[in-house]
Image (spheres, helix red, strand yellow):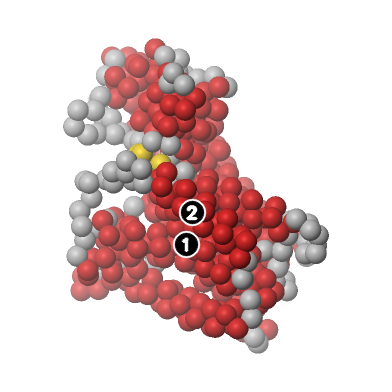
Amino acid sequence: MRSLIAAILLLPVSIYFLWVIRFAVNVPQLDDFHAILASTQLIREAPTIKEAFGWSIALHNEHRIGYTRWVSLVAYACGPIDFRSIILWGNLALLGILGLFYRSFQSTTLPLFYFLPVPFLLFQLQYFENTFFAMAALQNLGVWCWAGWSLWWLISPDLTGVSDQPGRGWIRFAGSLSMALLATFTSGNGLFVWPLGLVLLVMQRKRRQLIGWTLAFGWVANTYFQDFVGNMHHRQNRLWEVIQAGFGYIGALIGFPTSLPAAINGPIVPMGVGIVLCTFVAVRSLLWLRKAWKDSRSVGSNPAEAFNLAYFGFIVLTAGAISLHRPPILAICVPRYRIATALAFILVYVLALPVLENVRWRRLFASVGLVGSVVFCGLTYVKNTPVIKTQRAALIKDVHDFRSVGRVSNPTYQREGYSPEAEWQKAIRSGLYELPNDF
């Protein structure tokens, strides 16, 4: 039975990475030109290590994407940058997230059967932009992995499973700090792990770790916001748009239900789903806070609950930041944002399991969740694979056009004053990149 469950768990993972290997192409797109190619050149030409590090964490819009640039440097050290390798590396963060959920699930007494819907909700193609876009894979998948492990190590049993070994708590704390720093310099929303960490440490009465965390938070905030200039191209949303964008971002797993009547179409349905999810988690959070405030040991005795609530809090804070400046339609429909809503559904599922004390109802809930997640996962492949093929063909055409006539007739990244030909010529002359011959 365990072998069958393991095979089912690995099925969506295997299919997902088969798609990555089959459809990823060694061609830069969108922000890859600046965040990977141009940044690698600037760091390489920096006269001092200090300046090179400064370039590596320089702002990209409102984000300090150090992780993207560090991975690019390592890729370049192995030869001309291969975007397929970077894409594959970025997608490995999903394995880290799956391992995180599995580690959290292990701390409960539930059978492994109840975990089966998780990989089907995680390894699907609703966020295909992250799957096949190098910078997005590193940034938008990586930050959720690092932030999750940071929160887990603040509350979990120690790495060996033996709680009374001296110094083990500080090893976990150092790991948590490291992951928090990496999350911060992967994407802007990585900053939100710091206030959530403060809450977890306060609830556990860990005073010394709280002091260390606060000092690190202060240094990070000072470093991050030094010479900070946000992306001024984004407009300021009105209150109703903020509500639509925020809750819609959390409830946008399926997207716009365009088949519904116009009166209830658009952001209303995803927003309603987001409100339901957030209401359920808010009630669970209040109950947890009351219990943890009375007895700080209850946090460590049920680390899965504390982690799931904190991780959902990370999603809510991210949704709040996005809702301020992104129109609701973008917050809901942009594929690279949908990693968050997938995680939100997973967290609500695992938080709901302990609520169902009757074993029969719990099994029924898990069975419905498994069937629903399998069907949903399959539909994302049916829906998005044609789009992925079209985008891949456009990237390959860019390469053929550039090689044959020295121009790109239909560039995948268009903006005023931008020339993909100039970017490619510069990268090729410097040895950063070679046009692929095989696809």
* Residue hosting label 2: 217
**Mark 1 highlights which residue?**
195
Residue drawn at 65 percent across, 69 percent down: 303
Q: Quick check: marks 2 and 1 in contact, CB under 8 Å?
A: yes
Instruction: Please identify the quarter of the rendering in which residue 253 is found.
Output: bottom left
Q: From the viewer's perspective, is residue 130 above or below residue 249?
A: above
Q: Position of residue 125 (x, y in %)?
A: 46, 51
Residue occupying image coordinates x 21% and y 46%? 233
Q: CA distance from mark 2 to mark 1?
A: 8 Å
The disc labelled 1 sits on which kind of residue? Answer: Pro
Residue 219 percent coordinates (x, y): 47, 48
Q: Which mark is residue 19?
A: none
Q: Residues within 10 Å of mark 2 (few under 14, many from 20)?
A: many
In the rendered structure, the answer to whether residue 200 lies left or right of residue 130 reads right
Total number of numbered discs in the rendering: 2
Q: Is residue 325 above or below residue 61?
A: below
Q: Earlier in the sequence, mark 2 or mark 1?
A: 1
Identify the image quadrant of residue 168: bottom right
* Element type where label 1 sits in the image: helix
Q: Residue at x 80, y 64 (%)?
A: 164
Kind of residue indicated by mark 2: Phe
Furthest-bottom residue in this view: 358
Q: Secondary structure at mark 2?
A: helix
Whether residue 306 is visible here, answered yes or no, is: yes
Residue at image point 52% right, 51% down: 216
